[in-house]
Image: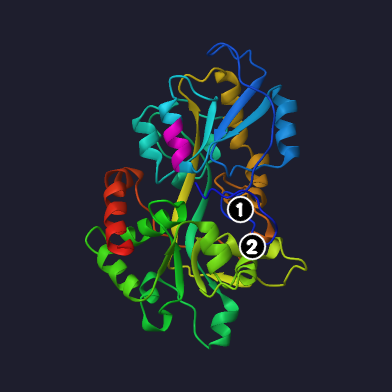
Amino acid sequence: MSNNKKRLTAVVVGLGMAGTLAACGSSGGDQGSGDSKTVTLVSHDSWAASKGVIAAFEKQSGYKVNVLEDGDAGQAVNKAILTKDNPQGDVFFGVDNTLLSRALDNGLFQPYEAKGSDRIKPEYRADQGKHRVTPVDTGDICVNYDKKYFADHKLAPPKSFDDLVKPQYKNLLVTENASASSPGLGFLLGTAAKYGDDGWQGYWKKLKANGVKVVDGWEQAYNEEFSGSAGGKKAKGDRPLVVSYASSPPVEVVYADPKPGTAPTGVAQGTCFRQVEYAGLLSNAKNTKGGKAFLDFLVSERFQEDMPLNMFVYPVREGAQVPPEFVKFGPQAEDPETMDPAKIADHRDQWVKSWTSLVLK
């Protein structure tokens, strides 16, 4: 999901796919032999999992896990495509629905139906005919708001895309560059899904006229410009609306000391776009047997229930429990905008180009 955030301090902790896992080992063995004792995961730099959960997989499977982090999701996918004939590892994690078609069209993955795939919720499945990717997690990109700001100004926070262009919210929103940032791109796709191919540009003209601020990436938007986050408060951010995640409010509670009884931020539920993140067995992987075992592990109940407080995302497995902080402070959007990956593939580059001309110039 290319949110590309290392786990930082409690003040500026990343959201969405956040964190990093240090591991050791190197890949080896002949293709398909499965005799390598190491399985290598290639991911963007926001992978995270509990050490105990990884250790349990290593003990059960007999494989050591080696993690290679390779920049943001877009960079990681592109590099994986360029090196597909001699891949860096066995499994790739971190291609989401905004980039999925690029990976599939370039032959990045070989087919494998992970054990436990039948427990994945149907709405998150993709490529069902060939099983080249396995859904691992999901999250919603949404506008977050600073509760204190709106209470102090006796102003109702916005609830929808339509609200954001109203005069009372002028100069309040900060978002990320759609050409460089995963949440920025997700927000653009959300508006395209909402207003259609012919309507989203007119919407962004209104948004620009209403004073939307665009910054390079999520860290700057959320931890410097946004007045509602712990980091933004320290940086004296003055924008009470920010494009972030539905799972951002739980982070503000989980990492606060002392922990507040309620989240200081809220989510405008009518502004959400759903992302799904996938993993796959790399074409020409040296340790296919280990790679398959790791994909099975990613959809296991133990890993799925470990994800929320490590990567601040939702599991895709039926029945997987989420922490009470998620239920209370970061519920999934009830009716998020969605878009078929094939449509994203057909329009993404042109939309980003048009958006750049419209909003940044």
Circle 1 sits on which residue? Answer: 312
Q: Residue 12: image x %, image y %?
A: 64, 59
Residue 45's quadrant in the figure?
top right
Image marks 2 and 1: residues in contact by CB distance under 8 Å: yes
3D distance between C-alphas at marks 2 and 1: 8 Å
- Label ID, residue 63: none
Q: Report crowding for label 1: few under 14, some 14 to 19, many 20 or more residues within 10 A (C-alpha).
A: many
N-terminal of the pair, mark 2 or mark 1, is 2
Q: Is residue 224 visible?
A: yes
Q: Residue 130: image x %, image y %?
A: 40, 28
* Amino acid at circle 1: Phe
Circle 2 sits on which residue? Answer: 250
Give the vertical position of 86 relative to 270 (above or below).
above
Name the outermost residue toward the right.
Answer: 258
Give the vertical position of 181 relative to 163 (above or below).
above
Pick the residue in front: 114 or 91.
Answer: 91
Q: Residue 330: image x %, image y %?
A: 59, 63
In reply to whether residue 78 is colored magenta, the answer given is yes
The magenta span reads 74-79
Q: Residue 48: image x %, image y %?
A: 64, 43
Give the vertical position of 284 relative to 68 (above or below).
above
Question: Residue at point 42% right, 77% down?
Answer: 171
Residue 341's quadrant in the figure?
top left
- Magenta stretch, main secondary structure, is helix
Pick the residue in front: 294 or 241.
Answer: 241
* Amino acid at circle 2: Pro
Q: Report crowding for label 2: few under 14, some 14 to 19, many 20 or more residues within 10 A (C-alpha).
A: many
What secondary structure is found at the residue carrying circle 1?
loop
Question: Residue at point 42% right, 51% down?
Answer: 180
Pick the residue in front: 330 or 25.
Answer: 25
